[in-house]
Image (cartoon, rainbow, N blue to C red):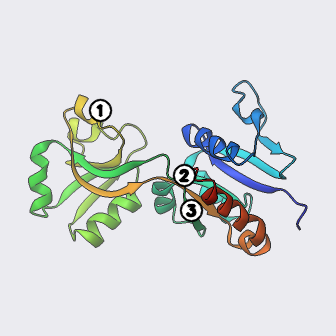
Amino acid sequence: MEDRYLTIALCKGRVANQTMELLENLGIRCDEIKDKSTRKLIFQDDEHKLRFFLAKGPDVPTYVEYGAADLGVVGSDIIEEEQRRVIELLDLGFGKCRMCVCGPKEAKELLLHREQIRVATKYPVIAKDYFHNKKYQTVDIIKLNGPVELGPIVELSDVIVDIVETGSTLRENGLDVLEEISPISSRLIVNRVSLKMQKERIEKLVEDIKSKNVL
C-alpha cells in the first residue's frame, strides 16, 4: 500500500491554482496541470507518488466519499451543501469569502420581524439550515443555477443566499449584504478509508503544510 499513488481531486479554477502553489512550496510539482491546452484528465507527480484531477466543485466531495480520490480540496460552502461522508483535515486559508443573505435594503425589515419570505439560492441546504434552525423563520426556498442576484430584481424572491467576495456585483444591482451566515475558505478533505489505510502519508502531508507556514 505504501507504493500506491495518493489521488487528489481539485476544484477547477482558482482553488486548483492556489492548491498547486501551496504544494510547490513543499517541493511537489505537476506542471502539466497548468497547461490550459492539454486534454489530459489525470496528472501525476511520480517522485512523490501523487495523482491529481480537476473536477467541478460540487463533485469533489463525491469523488472523495466514494474513494475515487483519497483527498480533495474544495470550499467549505460546498462541503456543507453537499453533506458527503468525508473528513475535513485542514483549513488551507485561501479562497476566503462569506456566505450571506443579500437583498434590497428594505428587505432587512422582513428578516428582523421573521416574516415568511422567498429565498433564491444555489445553496438550498445551507439556506434551509440557516433560516429554519438558526433564525426560526419560515421561508420558501427557490433553487437557482444561474445568477441569483436576479431573484429580487425580477421579484422572484425577497432575498438571496449566496457567496460574497467583494460585493461589487451586489452593489451594481442595487443589493446589499443583510446578514452574514458564515465565513468560507478552501479545505482539505479525506476519504474515511484512505485516512486509515494511508494514515502516515496523509498525516505527513498535513504536517508539512503546517510546518512550512504556507497557510
Q: Nearer the viewer, mark 2 or mark 3?
A: 2
The residue depicted at 20 percent of the width and 67 percent of the height is: 137
The residue depicted at 9 percent of the width and 63 percent of the height is: 113
- Distance between the Cα atoms at labels 1 and 3? 30 Å
Give the labeled residue for mark 2: 215
Q: Residue 156: where, in percent of width, then height?
A: 24, 43
Mark closest to the chain's N terminus, 1 or 3 = 3
SS class, disc 2: loop
Residue found at the very far bottom of the displayed protein: 196
Crowd rating for badge 2 (residues with CA inside 10 Å; few <14, some 14–19, many 20+): few
Image quadrant where residue 129 sits: bottom left
Given the image, on which type of amino acid does mark 3 rest? Leu
Disc ID at residue 168: 1
Pointer 2 and pointer 3: residues touching (CB < 8 Å)? no
Q: Nearer the viewer, mark 1 or mark 2?
A: 2
The residue depicted at 24 percent of the width and 47 percent of the height is: 102
The residue depicted at 23 percent of the width and 48 percent of the height is: 159
Does residue 66 appear in the picture of this structure?
A: yes
SS class, disc 3: strand
- Distance between the Cα atoms at labels 2 and 3? 10 Å
Mark closest to the chain's N terminus, 2 or 3 = 3
Give the labeled residue for mark 3: 90
The reply, left or right, for residue 116 in relation to residue 97 is: left
SS class, disc 1: helix
The reply, left or right, for residue 160 in relation to residue 51 is: left
Given the image, on which type of amino acid does mark 1 rest? Ser
Q: Is residue 168 above or below residue 95?
A: above
Does residue 154 appear in the picture of this structure?
A: no
Image quadrant where residue 21 sits: top right
